[in-house]
Image (cartoon, grey):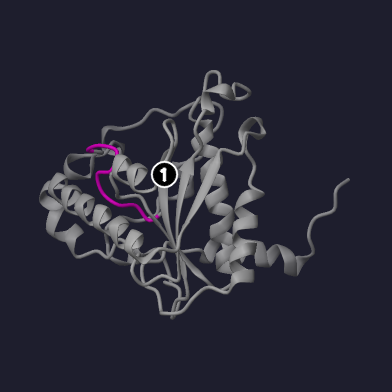
Amino acid sequence: MAQPFDEAERAAVYRAIYERRDMRHFTPGPVDAAVMARLLDAAHHAPSVGYMQPWRIVRITDAALREQLHETVERERLATADALGKRRDEFMKLKVEGMRECGELLVVALMDRRETHIFGRRTLPEMDLASVACAIQNMWLAARAEGLGMGWVSIFDVDDVRTLLRMPAGAKPVAILCVGHVAEFYPKPMLEMEHWAERRALGECVYENRWPDLHAEDAPQGEDAPQGENAGTADH
């Protein structure tokens, strides 16, 4: 029988999970090269469906390119605010990214020619995206263990970013990641602190055997209902 980690090791894993935060506030300073290499290696050791390894990570080291990426995020931020209706002003008060302040800026994308990978994707082609999300989560937990903050920016025009990074046909950016030093980690998710949303109880998300009968109040209502792929921001 496989042996579990010892108590201290288990505690460290769960601590990283529970203390991981979607960070938007960073302090100046570069990320140590050896630490950054460890984070990238952690991402690259994520599980992937059919072992397709669909993640492609672009490090943004050009200051002008970083600013161009920030501009496309800002355009989408304003468009998202307009799409939120009555919650527009509330949304505009939120800090949704730290792209100018973070030590490292990464763009994570799905690779091109993914259609050749059938194993595990014949009926669920979106499993390539699930695999990329696993890579991002690996990096996120590793960053927390290293004392670094990481924030996932998902408010951007896909075609704008694809063009800026000269991605081939079929490749698709899915995340802009801010990585860097932070003064402190938020005590709980920022959007919860800002009263944007609250974490659901575990029992609302875990079912047994079959989907339960849902009441009308369980469905998103009004301005909280989804309004498009990038309508709003989430504390990932």
Q: Is residue 207 visible?
A: no
Residue 66 as seen in the image, left or right of residue 60: left
Which residue is at the far right? 1
- Which residue is found at the position 46% from the left and 27% from the top? 211
Residue 139: which quarter of the image?
bottom right
**What residue do we see at 60% from left, 52% from top?**
43
* Residue for badge 1: 174
Instruction: Residue 234 in the image: state x and y as whole percent.
Output: 34, 52
Q: Is residue 125 placed above or below 36 in the rendered structure?
A: above
Q: Position of residue 218 (x, y in %)?
A: 31, 38
Toward the viewer: 49 or 14? 49
Q: Position of residue 101 (x, y in %)?
A: 36, 72
**Identity of the residue drawn at 45% across and 73% down:** 185
Residue farthest top in this picture: 122
Quick check: is 71 in the magenta stretch? no
Query: Does residue 188 appear anywhere in the picture?
Result: yes
Q: Which residues are magenta?
A: 227-235
Amino acid at dot 1: Val
Residue appearing at x 17%, y 40% in the figure: 222
Q: Eyeballing the image, is 94 above or below 75?
A: below
Residue 10 image position (x, y, % from top left):
71, 62
Is 125 positioned to the left or the right of 43 in the image?
Answer: left
Q: Nearer the viewer, residue 110 or 14?
A: 110
In depth, the one of 4 and 51 nearer the eye is 51
